[in-house]
Image (tube, rainbow, N blue to C red):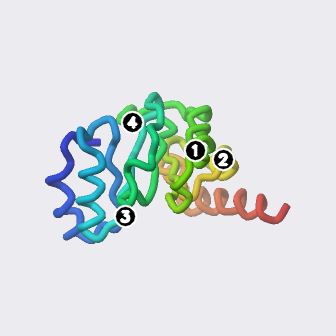
Amino acid sequence: MTREPEWLIPVLAEMGADMISIHFEACPYPRRTLGLIHRSGMQAGLAFNPKTSLPTLQHYLPFLSFILILTTEPEISGCTYLPTVLEKVRNGKKQNGIEEVLWEVDGGITAENILDAVAVGADIVVSGRGVFSGGAIESNISEMKKVINKQWET
């Protein structure tokens, strides 16, 4: 999360990034910045901290490709997973005109709670601690996949 991220966008594009999200709370002109990301050939997203309510998202079209909902407080190591924040995904997906926008969740996602994110309609799930926990990367990822695959079997 950085304030006035516009200067970073060309650098990240040159480095090969294909998706960039900006924090709604840290960007004074989010629509303008989303447009810059979009014109740089990347997918543009808005990230929302747990405490921030979602605005009407149609205003950010046609530049908005995805919404990132943080399910932990950013920049706090070991922060607790906040499952109630997932309701933003469920409720946000009901907004008219944004059916093509993807929904991403990030923060405290593990094999034990990944289905919560899927159940509310998350299209993309990011897991850091859940993947790297105990240094068992391969087994942690395998367990998450197993949980998701089992869900689709039933």
Task: In the rendered structure, find residue 120 and report the number of the disc placed on it.
Answer: 2
Residues at marks 4 and 3 touching, judged by CB atoms closer than 8 Å? no
Task: In the rendered structure, find residue 74 and report the number of the disc placed on it.
Answer: 4
Horizontally, residue 76 falls left or right of residue 134, namely: left
Q: On the image, numbered disc 3 is attached to which residue?
A: 43
Q: On the image, numbered disc 1 is attached to which residue?
A: 89
Could you tell me how far apart the alpha carbons at marks 4 and 3 are, in whole angstroms?
22 Å
Earlier residue among tags 3 and 1:
3
Could you tell me how far apart the alpha carbons at marks 2 and 1 are, in whole angstroms?
6 Å
Identify the residue shown where x is 21% and y is 59%: 9
Amino acid at dot 3: Gln
Along the line of sight, the residue nearer the viewer: 90 or 74: 90
Residues at marks 2 and 4 touching, judged by CB atoms closer than 8 Å? no
Crowding at mark 1 (Cα within 10 Å: few <14, some 14-19, many 20+): many
Amino acid at dot 1: Val
Q: Name the residue furthest left.
A: 7
Q: Position of residue 54 (x, y in %)?
A: 47, 37
Could you tell me how far apart the alpha carbons at marks 2 and 4 are, in whole angstroms?
21 Å
Along the line of sight, the residue nearer the viewer: 125 or 110: 125
The local secondary structure at tag 1 comes to helix
Earlier residue among tags 3 and 2:
3
The local secondary structure at tag 4 comes to loop
Residues at marks 2 and 1 touching, judged by CB atoms closer than 8 Å? yes
Identify the residue shown where x is 19% and y is 43%: 4
Horizontally, residue 38 falls left or right of residue 110, namely: left
Quarter of the figure that contains the C terminus: bottom right
Q: Position of residue 62 (x, y in %)?
A: 38, 60
